């Protein structure tokens, strides 16, 4: 009886371990499935939006403005803020014909473009957040959280330029989506192009690309140089 009980406990432990291993194996597969489903839904929504903008352009036969494009999207897709099922930010850019096209910050196939748009938007949101802090009488924090593509993104303050010019997947010490900012006159960051205490340096990087902004140089990084992530 004692031996039988020991065998039963061993079998139970083995079954539990097998179950845990199956769950660990299934999680990545499930995540891939969810991502593909969201990407497919996003692509369909973007196509509808793109078709609506083209129809509006052809009916008016002029280039229009961003405001006109936004109004058209609101008419074609009333739930435009939720156009991407994963909450990706929708950007509007002009194509070679002067027609506005929607670009998803999470799923667009042009990874370099995606990184550039997200970086610009992240810097804009960070600047707004910093101005709010100053207006309330607070000091510039060591980090500020913004929301990009419906996800929280922590922007970390630095006092010198980083060796981060490619995607985090190919840069040691970084993982996922990251953002860093530096202020004029803080540490070794001095450009002479903006006022003391203003953002003079900003880095945004995802797994594939990085976008780096310096007040006296503008935007650089692999997202702009085409080094990778195409």
Image (cartoon, rainbow, N blue to C red):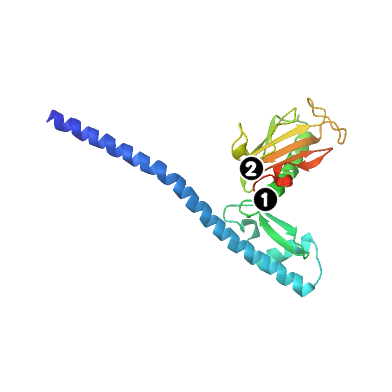
- In this view of the protein, which residue sits in the foreground, 208 or 54? 208
Image coordinates of residue 221 in percent, x first then y, are: 72, 41
Q: Is residue 77 visible?
A: no
Where does the image place residue 88, in percent across and percent down from the top left?
62, 52
Q: Is residue 40 visible to the viewer in this orientation of the structure?
A: yes
Secondary structure type for disc 1: helix
User: Within 10 angstroms of label 2, few (less than 14), some, or many (20 or more) residues?
Assistant: many
Residue at the image point whose x is 86% and y is 34% from the top: 195
Decide which of tag 1 and tag 2 comes sooner along the chain: 1
Residue drawn at (39%, 43%) of the image: 23
- Which residue corresponds to mark 2? 206
* Residue 188 horizontal side relative to residue 46, left or right: right
Residue identified by numbered label 1: 114
Residue 153 higher or lower than 100, as above or below: above
User: Alpha-carbon distance for marks 1 and 2?
Assistant: 10 Å
Residue at (68, 47) in percent of width and height? 115
**Location of residue 78 by image quarter:** bottom right
Q: In this view, does 129 lie to the left or right of 109?
A: right
Q: Where's residue 228, x and y in %?
A: 66, 45
Q: For mark 1, does the 10 Å Cα neighbourhood hold few (<14), some (14 to 19), or many (20 or more) residues?
A: many
Q: Relative to the observer, which residue lies in front, 162 or 198?
A: 162
Of 43 and 109, the residue lying toward us: 109
Which residue occupies 68% across, 49% down?
112
Marks 1 and 2: CB-CB under 8 Å? Answer: yes
Q: Please, is residue 26 above or below residue 78 in the view?
A: above
Q: In which quadrant of the rendered image does the N terminus lie?
A: top left
The relative height of residue 223 versus residue 143 in the rendered view (above or below) is below
Q: Residue furthest bottom?
A: 59
Q: Percent from the top left, x then y, of residue 105?
A: 65, 51
In terms of secondary structure, where does tag 2 sit? Answer: loop
């Amino acid at each position: 009886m004692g031996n039988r009980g020991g065998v039963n406990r061993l079998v139970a432990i083995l079954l539990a371990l097998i179950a845990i291993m199956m769950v660990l194996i299934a999680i990545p597969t499930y995540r891939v499935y969810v991502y593909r489903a969201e990407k497919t839904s996003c692509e369909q929504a973007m196509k509808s939006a793109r078709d609506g903008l083209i129809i509006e352009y052809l009916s008016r036969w002029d280039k229009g403005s961003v405001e006109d494009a936004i109004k058209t999207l609101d008419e074609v897709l009333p739930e435009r803020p939720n156009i991407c099922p994963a909450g990706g930010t929708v950007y509007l850019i002009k194509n070679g014909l002067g027609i506005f096209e929607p670009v998803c910050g999470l799923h667009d196939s042009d990874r370099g473009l995606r990184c550039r748009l997200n970086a610009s938007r992240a810097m804009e949101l960070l600047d707004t957040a910093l101005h709010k802090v100053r207006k309330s009488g607070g000091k510039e924090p060591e980090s500020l959280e913004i929301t990009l593509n419906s996800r929280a993104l922590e922007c970390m303050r630095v006092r010198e330029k980083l060796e981060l010019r490619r995607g985090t997947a190919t840069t040691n010490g970084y993982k996922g989506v990251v953002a860093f900012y530096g202020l004029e006159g803080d540490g070794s960051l001095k450009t002479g192009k903006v006022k003391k205490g203003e953002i003079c340096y900003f880095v945004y990087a995802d797994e594939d690309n990085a976008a780096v902004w310096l007040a006296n140089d503008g935007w650089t990084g692999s997202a702009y140089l085409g080094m990778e992530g195409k």
